[in-house]
Amino acid sequence: MSGGFGAEETVITLDPAVLDVPLPQANEHTAALVLDQCRELLARRRARTGLAGQVRDVLVSRLVDPPDADEVARLLHVGSRTLRHRLAAEGTSYRALLAEVREHLAEELLITAGMPVEQIARRLGYAEVSSFSQAFRQWKGVGPREYRKRYPALSR
């Protein structure tokens, strides 16, 4: 297939510096609204159902002192092995769900709650801020403070 004017392809090139220039009609309120909508869409897409959803609900309700997999199994009235096998069949695990819950809540708390990083770490069940920071870096590629700086319009 050929591009316009009989060429093999149609290409537009831009100086990369142009990508960092603010748009002349940029609107902070609209940007914040769009980011909220994106987060909501992602949350709906990531929503868990089945046993994984039940495990996630238990973890959210007890995140400061999260129960281990055996306790979650007891709370949901299934055996530990059954929990493990059914979560695997749903494409996840207890550890993955715990990390997922912590990641999503950490992101939300950093952007909207205005809480100190130390308080967020405690709320998410981390004994040490350094453990939380290390986990956050694995999730997002940057530390929690740097992540927060990327969203100043949304932070309180």
Image (spheres, grey):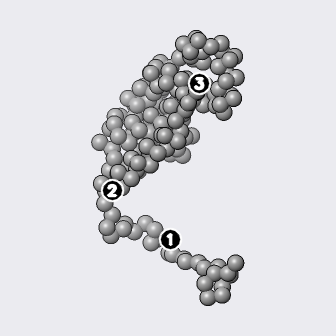
Q: Report the disc number at residue 51.
A: 3
Residue lying farthest to the bottom in this orientation: 5
Q: Residue at x 46, y 20 (%)?
A: 62
Q: Which residue lies under the disc numbered 1? A: 16
Where residue 123 sits, quadrant-wise, is top left
Q: Could you tell me how far apart the alpha carbons at marks 2 and 3 are, in whole angstroms?
A: 37 Å
When the figure is inspected, residue 139 is found, relative to residue 125, above or below; the finding is below
Q: Which residue lies under the disc numbered 2? A: 30
Q: Which of the two labelled residues, at mark 1 and mark 3, occupies the earlier sequence position?
A: 1
In the image, residue 119 lies at what x, y percent? 38, 29
Secondary structure under tag 2 reads helix
Q: Is residue 91 left or right of residue 71?
A: right
Residue lying farthest to the front in this orientation: 50
In the image, residue 12 lies at what x, y percent? 55, 77
In the image, residue 16 lies at what x, y percent? 50, 71
User: Identity of the amino acid at label 3?
Assistant: Leu
